[in-house]
Image (spheres, rainbow, N blue to C red):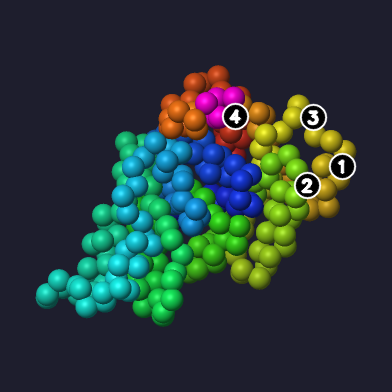
């Protein structure tokens, strides 16, 4: 059974960057197969990893809904949709990436969603690890039939608004009926020491801090130059923080 790492947090706090750095960790230190899933409608994990995304699961869904009779003659709808799903998996030498893409438009998507979700869960069995970059509401995880998450990493920047957002996400986990084995906070763009006010808010949320990521000029430079974070230098402060965290948890 695959182990699942999921990330969530409000937009702009850096969870996609954290996801990319975790993928970098696996590509460098683990021989176990990893499937990264970009489940945020604002899909940019592929770009952050330097991968070209031509089509997403959302594109398949919308194309099918526009023309449900466009299945090739003699081919079953399920087989057809599954063949399209195989085409949107982006393969990298160290991991694969599946981008969920756009949200649903108007109309009933139940049938096509059931097929796509079932295919995705069958696909996941081929990997030892799943890394899921979620939207704040974690709709993708809530639709999973297993409902299991081995490690939920709630990402915030060094601001009380971001911290309170992950606090709200933590509170709604019971409503989503997710089986979360472990969970904790990642504080991005953190100073050398966290303020008493920030730590008091952390205490009220009741989650441990898994990792603090310092400001790292490499991240801004790579973003401006449209370079993959897989190419970050080994002395990158952000990369070193994630590597230290993953070595403690992954091992």
* Residue 152 screen position, x and y as percent: 61, 52
Work out whether mark 2 precedes mark 1 in sequence or the reverse, and give the earlier one: 2
* Residue 203 screen position, x and y as percent: 83, 48
Q: Look at discs 2 and 3 and give the one toward the viewer.
A: 2
Q: Quadrant of the C terminus?
A: top right
* Residue 26 screen position, x and y as percent: 46, 36
Check whether the beta carbons of the residues at disc 1 and disc 4 lie within 8 A of each other. Answer: no
Check whether the beta carbons of the residues at disc 2 and disc 1 lie within 8 A of each other. Answer: yes
* Residue 89 screen position, x and y as percent: 32, 51
Work out whether mark 1 precedes mark 4 in sequence or the reverse, and give the earlier one: 1
Position above or below: 166 against 58: above
**Local crowd at mark 3 within 10 Å, few (<14), some, or many (≥20)?**
few
Q: Is residue 84 magenta?
A: no
Q: Would you identify the image quadrant in which residue 179 lies?
A: bottom right
Work out whether mark 3 precedes mark 4 in sequence or the reverse, and give the earlier one: 3
Q: State the extent of the magenta-drawn residues as a range.
A: 217-221
Position above or below: 195 against 205: above
Residue with the mark numbered 3 = 193
Residue with the mark numbered 2 = 160
Residue drawn 61% across the image and 68% down it: 176
Q: CA distance from mark 2 to mark 3?
A: 15 Å
Q: CA distance from mark 3 to mark 1?
A: 12 Å
């Amino acid at each position: 059974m695959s182990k699942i790492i999921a990330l969530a947090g409000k937009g702009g706090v850096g969870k996609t960057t954290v996801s990319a750095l975790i993928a970098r960790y696996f590509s460098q230190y683990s021989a176990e197969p990893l499937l990264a899933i970009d489940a945020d409608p604002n899909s940019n994990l592929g770009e952050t990893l330097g991968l070209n995304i031509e089509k997403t699961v959302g594109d398949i869904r919308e194309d099918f809904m526009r023309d449900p009779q466009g299945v090739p003659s003699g081919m079953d709808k399920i087989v057809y949709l599954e063949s399209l799903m195989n085409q949107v998996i982006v393969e990298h030498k160290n991991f694969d990436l599946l981008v969920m893409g756009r949200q649903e438009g108007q109309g009933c998507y139940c049938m096509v969603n059931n097929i796509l979700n079932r295919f995705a869960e069958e696909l996941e069995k081929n990997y030892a690890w799943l890394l899921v970059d979620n939207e704040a509401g974690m709709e993708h995880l809530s639709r999973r039939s297993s409902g299991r998450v081995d490690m939920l990493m709630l990402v915030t920047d060094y601001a009380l608004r971001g911290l309170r957002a992950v606090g709200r996400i933590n509170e709604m986990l019971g409503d989503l009926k997710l089986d979360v084995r472990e969970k904790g906070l990642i504080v991005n763009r953190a100073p050398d020491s966290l303020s008493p006010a920030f730590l008091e808010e952390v205490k009220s949320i009741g989650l441990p801090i898994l990792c603090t990521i310092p400001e790292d000029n490499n991240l801004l430079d790579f973003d401006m130059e449209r370079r993959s974070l897989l190419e970050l230098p080994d002395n990158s402060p952000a990369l070193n923080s994630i590597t230290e965290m993953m070595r403690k948890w992954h091992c």
